Image (cartoon, rainbow, N blue to C red):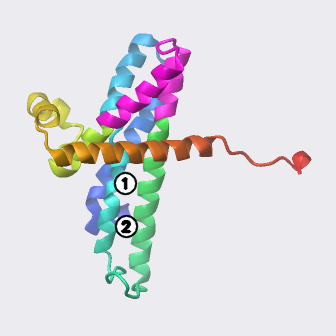
Amino acid sequence: MLFVARNYHFMALNVLLGYIPLELSFHYKKVNNQLFLLLGILWLLFYPNAPYLFTDFFHLENLSIYQGMNQIFGQSLSAWFSFSLLTVGICVYGLLGMATVFTTLNECFQRNILNKKWQGFLFIMIVNVLSSLAIFVGRFDRLHSVHLLTKPIQTLQIIFFNWSVNKVLFILLFTGMQFLLLAAIFGLKGLRLVDEGEM
């Protein structure tokens, strides 16, 4: 990210915010139930920053390699290097951050906070809907997670009391997108290399 900071300085902050839910999930096993609930709340506040990263793909069109539809792409090596860095940052931290949904969910089951499969599905649904709502206000109202701490009342009013048809449709669209990404992550987590003895 530092190599493209001049053109994409916002990505340094976005990637950092996308990493926070991953960092929080590393500490689940180290705390008791009360502190776990506190970590869980913090995780929920910062989790939307992970899927939010995928909206940054729109900024790739600003690179000089993009010359419009049905045209030959530019061959600038520095531009393609910037493309690679941006893509890696978005995909790695976006997917790893989203994978913490399963880490958090498993921890809730292990601590008997949740104990039914339908509760797990409801948990994922609520997280996805709230995350899509947060992505909307982050992208279009320019709010960040930290605003919940610095301007809590104003931020909550914008999030929960300022509605439109486009907002509802966006939330439905991104909730579906997140379900597909989580399904892909869940499928990838089940992959493993074949042992030589099985070949």
Which of discs 2 and 1 lies nearer the camera? The answer is 1
Residue 105 colored magenta?
Answer: yes
Say above or below: 102 vs 177.
above
Amino acid found under the numbered disc labelled 1: Phe
Q: CA distance from mark 2 to mark 1?
A: 20 Å
- Of helix, strand and loop, which one carries label 1? helix
Dominant SS of magenta comes to: helix
Mark found first going from the N terminus, 2 or 1: 2
Which residue corresponds to the image point at 31% horizontal and 82% vertical from the top-left? Answer: 68
- Of helix, strand and loop, which one carries label 2? helix
Say above or below: 169 vs 124.
below
Residue hosting label 1:
54
Number of numbered discs overlaid on the protein picture:
2
Which residue corresponds to the image point at 38% horizontal and 77% vertical from the top-left? Answer: 79
Residue 108 colored magenta?
Answer: yes
Amino acid found under the numbered disc labelled 2: Phe
* Residue 5 rendering spot, x and y as whole percentages: 30, 64
Name the disc covering residue 148, or none.
none
Which residue corresponds to the image point at 32% horizontal and 35% vertical from the top-left? Answer: 129
Which residue corresponds to the image point at 40% horizontal and 63% vertical from the top-left? Answer: 86
Q: Looking at the image, which is closer to me, 71 or 4?
A: 71
Residue hosting label 2:
3
Q: Which residues are magenta?
A: 101-130
* Residue 149 rendering spot, x and y as whole percentages: 18, 30
Q: Quadrant of residue 191?
A: top right
